[in-house]
């Protein structure tokens, strides 16, 4: 149903309903499609047990002449401290339970911290045995009408690997077995250099690092350094102005002197039979090239599937309007900028970047809501194997052991959210399965192998923990490829024998051709099965040793400017926060806004008694 509209969450047949129980009476009123107000009334008889507990608590906090500690009668406490303070204590202790009861009665799922206002307390605002009343405003998950998602039509580029793709795969394989050779000429883009950096602010030296390895043009250190290095020869130096990122001088302007120690260029091995035997399981270079050609073709098909999946999701989202709670967006923005250790106003935190993160957060939220509805309609479930596979693949993104990652998620209570992620990616795979996909030449595209390759791979949904294209990965290390290319040759130069054991099978893994750059940023990649992940990890481990050894000294890291951000889902953000140790427990407890002078009186009474 194109043009599906959002509508408020129905509590009954109208926008307002009243639910009653022996504990509380709650009324829910929709303020907007994403926000609701709960009016809650707690009878005095249900508050009284907590009031009795409050008297015991206060009795243990004060000392009154003639009474043992903890044995002060309620009437004495009322005289000395005031009944209002005791009632406030009881309300604050029980408010969360009453709030949770109201949520259950009205079938409300909160998506934001509640804003609570106590409107009446017994003995404070009227009858001493009157009811407790309070109101709560909070954001909720919107309800939408699911549009017709079967038969969506999209057009993609033909899946064809070019000779350039095949040659690129071969060159990348050769580069893994390359060595660095010192050359006597000025440095140019692509060269590897060793250098010394000294940063000063005014007359004060604030940083110094020696024997750093860097690839000119990589762009992963300081702004202006690539330009300063180009044209320098060994032993020469240059000075440039830049902004430091990280450390106590982050965001400050500094003068940096760079001294070039050596210039090296990468020497690639000849593409012959000897290389084929060294780098793969094949005996001849022709066999290796044929295998690379086949893998490049498979990569092209994968790229086509990614493009189709992203476009199908784009078309689906166009069919329905999803209201987005502002509080959800604000939380995502705050987590993005503060959860990575960035200071307000630094290079990372710009107006453009904030606007980009906001857009992506809204897009990810819409995707979640719509795909959850599809999952409901298709009765999509998640089995244990699928959950385990998702945890394994996600843990690799954080460089953690799957068991450790799973334990952290379990302890933080994030497993249900992760299951939701898996369920959504399966729902998107279902939409793609129903879609009508053709290429620009008018040929029908069969995506069966992409939707369920090898019978068990799934398609990942937009906004999952996801995305190698995420802004966080882009911000923390601009280019993993650059890092590999910078580190690997240096290791090869030191110990080439360890790098290249004979009869390995790296050729069996060719890089997948990426989808066109015009993809919307809030999309994701195809998830790999456990077997595929393990096999690929085994192959990659034989191709090259991971660059685990960090330089002894580190130059001030460069913080990149705003980059295209892949929208992350709520579950992805939560999982990331758990990994980074920054997960905060939801503020379920909602203390009353009201305070009186009774608390101060109680403290003074306690002090005087002591």
Image (cartoon, grey):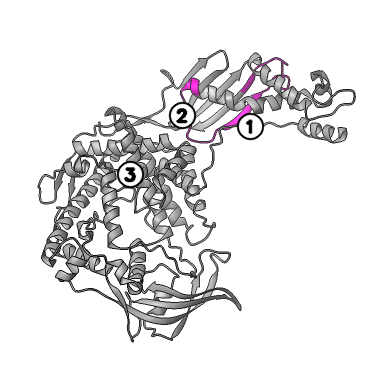
Question: What is the quadrant of the C terminus in the image?
Answer: top right
- Residue 478 located left or right of residue 593: left
On screen, 140 above or below 403?
A: above
**Residue 315, image x and y in percent?**
25, 41
- Residue 433 located left or right of residue 36: left
Majority SS type along the magenta span = loop
Tally the numbered discs: 3
Mark 2 → mark 3, Cα distance in angstroms: 23 Å
Residue lying at 30% horizontally and 53% vertically, measured from the top left: 537
Dot 2 falls on a residue whose secondary structure is: loop
Q: Based on the picture, tell me whether residue 21 belongs to the magenta stretch.
A: no
Mark 2 → mark 1, Cα distance in angstroms: 20 Å
Q: Based on the picture, tell me whether residue 122 belongs to the magenta stretch.
A: yes
**Residue 84, image x and y in percent?**
75, 25
Residue lying at 42% horizontally and 36% vertically, measured from the top left: 415
**Residue 471, image x and y in percent?**
40, 54
- Please report the bounds of the magenta region as a residue range: 104-133
For label 3, the residue is 462
13 and 229: which is toward the camera: 229
Q: Could one spot residue 156 in this view of the protein?
A: yes
Q: Residues within 10 Å of mark 1 (few under 14, many from 20)?
A: some
344 and 589: which is toward the camera: 589
The part of the image, by quadrant, that contains residue 100 is top right
Mark 3 → mark 1, Cα distance in angstroms: 37 Å
Query: Circles 2 and 1: CB distance less than 8 Å?
Result: no
Q: Residues within 10 Å of mark 2 (few under 14, many from 20)?
A: few
Dot 1 falls on a residue whose secondary structure is: loop
For label 1, the residue is 591
Dot 3 falls on a residue whose secondary structure is: loop
First in sequence, mark 2 or 3: give its number. Answer: 2
For label 2, the residue is 109
On screen, 196 above or below 99?
A: below
């Amino acid at each position: 149903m194109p043009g599906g509209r959002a509508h408020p969450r129905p509590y009954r047949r109208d926008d307002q309903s009243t639910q009653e129980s022996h504990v509380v009476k709650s009324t829910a009123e929709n303020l907007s499609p994403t926000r609701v107000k709960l009016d809650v009334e707690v009878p005095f008889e249900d508050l009284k047990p907590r009031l009795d507990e409050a008297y015991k608590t206060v009795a243990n906090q004060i000392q009154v002449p003639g009474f043992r500690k903890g044995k002060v009668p309620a009437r004495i406490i009322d005289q000395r401290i005031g009944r209002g303070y005791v009632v406030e204590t009881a309300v604050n202790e029980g408010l969360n339970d009453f709030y949770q009861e109201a949520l259950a009665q009205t079938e409300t799922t909160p998506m934001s911290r509640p804003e609570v206002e106590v409107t009446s307390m017994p003995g404070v605002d009227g009858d001493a045995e009157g009811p407790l009343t309070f109101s709560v405003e909070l954001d909720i998950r919107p309800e939408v009408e699911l549009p017709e998602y079967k038969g969506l039509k999209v057009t993609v580029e033909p899946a064809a690997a070019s000779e350039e793709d095949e040659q690129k795969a071969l060159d990348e394989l050769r580069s893994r077995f390359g060595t660095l050779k010192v050359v006597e000429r000025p440095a140019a883009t692509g060269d590897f250099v060793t250098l010394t950096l000294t940063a000063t602010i005014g007359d004060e030296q604030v940083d110094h690092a020696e024997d750093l390895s860097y690839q000119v043009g990589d762009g992963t250190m300081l702004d202006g350094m690539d330009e300063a290095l180009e044209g320098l020869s060994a032993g020469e130096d240059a000075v440039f102005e830049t902004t430091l990122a990280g450390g106590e001088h982050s965001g400050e302007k500094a003068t940096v002197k760079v001294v070039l120690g050596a210039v090296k260029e990468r020497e690639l091995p000849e593409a012959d039979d000897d290389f084929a035997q060294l780098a793969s399981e094949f005996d001849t270079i022709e066999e290796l090239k044929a295998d690379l050609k086949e893998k490049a073709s498979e990569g092209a098909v994968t790229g086509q599937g990614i493009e189709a999946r992203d476009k199908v999701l784009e078309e689906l989202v166009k069919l329905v309007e999803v209201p987005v709670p502002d509080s959800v967006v604000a939380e995502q923005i705050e987590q993005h900028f503060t959860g990575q250790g960035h200071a307000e106003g630094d290079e990372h935190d710009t107006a453009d970047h904030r606007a980009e993160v906001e857009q992506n957060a809204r897009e990810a939220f819409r995707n979640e809501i719509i795909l959850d509805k599809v999952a409901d309609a298709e009765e999509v479930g998640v089995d244990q194997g699928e959950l385990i596979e998702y945890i394994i693949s996600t843990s690799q993104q954080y460089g953690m052991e799957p068991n450790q990652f799973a334990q952290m998620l379990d302890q933080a209570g994030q497993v249900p959210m992760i299951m939701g992620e898996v369920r959504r990616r399966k729902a998107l795979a279902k939409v793609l399965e129903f879609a009508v996909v053709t290429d620009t030449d008018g040929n029908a595209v069969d995506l069966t192998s992409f939707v369920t390759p090898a019978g068990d791979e799934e398609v990942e949904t937009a906004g999952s923990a996801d995305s190698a294209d995420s802004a966080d990965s882009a911000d923390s290390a601009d280019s993993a490829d650059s890092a590999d290319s910078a580190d690997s040759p240096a290791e090869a130069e030191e110990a080439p024998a360890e790098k290249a054991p004979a009869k390995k099978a790296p050729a069996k893994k060719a890089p997948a051709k990426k989808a066109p750059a015009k993809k919307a940023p809030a999309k994701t990649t195809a998830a790999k099965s456990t077997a595929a992940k393990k096999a690929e990890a085994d192959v990659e481990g034989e191709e090259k040793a991971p660059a685990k050894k960090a330089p002894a000294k580190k130059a001030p890291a460069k913080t990149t400017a705003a980059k295209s951000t892949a929208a992350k889902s709520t579950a992805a953000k939560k999982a990331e926060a758990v990994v980074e140790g920054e997960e905060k427990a939801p503020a379920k407890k909602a203390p009353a806004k009201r305070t009186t002078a009774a608390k101060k009186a109680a403290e003074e009474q306690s002090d005087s008694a002591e």
